[in-house]
Amino acid sequence: MTIKVLKFGGSSLADAEQFRKVREIIFKEPGNKYVVASAPGKRFPEDIKVTDLLYKSMKKAVSGGNFQSRLDEIKDRFQQIIEDLGIAMDIEPDIELIREHLLGTPDTSYMGSRGEYLNSKILAEYLGFEFIDPAKCVVFDNEGNFMAEETRELLSKRLEDVDAAVIAGFYGARKDGRLQTFSRGGSDITGSIVAEAVGADIYENWTDVSGLLAADPRIIDNPKGVEYITYRELRALSYMGASVLHRDAVYPVAKAGIPINIRNTNRPNDKGTMIVSDMPEWVMSDQISGVAGFKGVTIIHIEKMRVSDEAGFTAVILDVFKDKGIPFEQCQTGIDTVTVSVKSEFVEGAILKDILYDIEKKLEPDDIFVRSNMAMVAVVGENNADSCNATSELLSAINHADIEIFTINQGAGNLNLLVNVSENDYEKTIKVLYDVIAAQIDN
Ligand code: ASP
């Protein structure tokens, strides 16, 4: 029997109709034993997620305002689900506890967690599964850092003799007992932790899209889906802005070698995307997995004659950024030149002046110039056996589209090409690169 952990996101549990779909998916296979649930998400585009309603009610309470109408809204969302599902459950005592909490000194994590807590309780009741409160088995230290080892031990012990369970996503508790949430979208992480703890064969992450797309659908009409992708590629694409899974959800399962399958609750027959540690052999060796990127990049270019003969020139430059706590995105070194790319948000106004001043002072360069309003675009395809050919094809596509490339980065490893172009050319660059990828998929 294949043991699965199934995590359902907010849109999959937004109302009773979605709950019914979820139930059908779960009862299809006997190994579907462990379910992780999010709080109810949006039912329609203008709707408000329950987690956001909880934060809004807290904001009202903190500012001394009347939070009752927000709390009523929250209660109504859950009450509606319970009624529509026809289950007997009284959430009044839980709502009363939230109300009392709001009257005291409300805590962001406590409030944020209540959506998952209540929704998971309802789902457990509806399925006839045991409800597991992660406050007792997902551990954080008193600074709010997640404690992986301890959690794995506690959680696997807790689930050892449980036949079927719904575990609330998104939160756990600190050593001192206070609740602690992960960052937004963190139920994905809970799903991954549970999969690792029970040694699942697969972690199914059910959402409202049929997996990862090879490009941003806001730029490309109907982009192709990605059938297989490695953890490392996914990490690269998520870093570049592709969003389908919380970034931190990859680590626990990647370590244990458990594949993640992104699935669509509204189209359960779609295969979705399989995230694996190594590509299956039959996946085409010239596959490029996807393209992603972001705007808002600033490039700082430094030149100094004969500096390549000296050791440590680049290190001194990077130290200037490090000393100011500014992470850099890329750093290209040429003969007597260094180019550093950073997110513009980190080098606004006086900070940029400071950086340039420090570089001038420490290195006395011959030339230094700054280009802002740049964009960074990445193409990943680590299964690509001929990355040299792929790179030349991708670059030539950009060139044919008359797009100026400011920097190129392609390491010695597998295909992971990064280019900097002007923000004005960002969408065009994604389009031409996607065309190359799509042509490969079609072949
Ligand atoms: N409900 C939380 C959020 O909206 C966590 C989650 O859905 O994963 O961010």
Image (cartoon, rainbow, N blue to C red):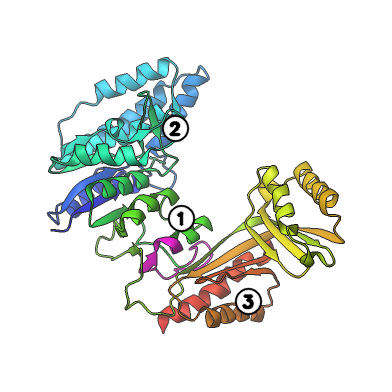
Residue matched to label 3: 398
Query: What whole-number distance in Å separates the C-alpha atoms at marks 3 and 1?
Result: 24 Å
Identified at 49% across, 72% down, the residue is 414
Q: Secondary structure at mark 3?
A: helix
Q: Secondary structure at mark 1?
A: loop
The amino acid on which the numbered mark 1 sits, given as a three-letter code, is: Ser
In-front residue for pair 125/73: 125
Would you place residue 126 above or below residue 271 in this image?
above
- In what quadrant does ligand 1 lie? top left
Q: Are marks 1 and 2 in contact (CB under 8 Å)?
A: no
The main secondary structure of the magenta stretch is loop
Identified at 32% across, 64% down, the residue is 272
Query: What whole-number distance in Å separates the C-alpha atoms at marks 3 and 2?
Result: 45 Å
Of label 3 and label 1, which has the lower sequence position? 1
* Residue 4 seen in this snapshot: yes
| Residue 47 place in picture, x, y as percent | 41, 42
Would you place residue 400 above or below residue 304 in this image?
below
Identified at 14% across, 56% down, the residue is 29
Of label 1 and label 2, which has the lower sequence position? 2
The stretch of residues the image draws in magenta is 215-233
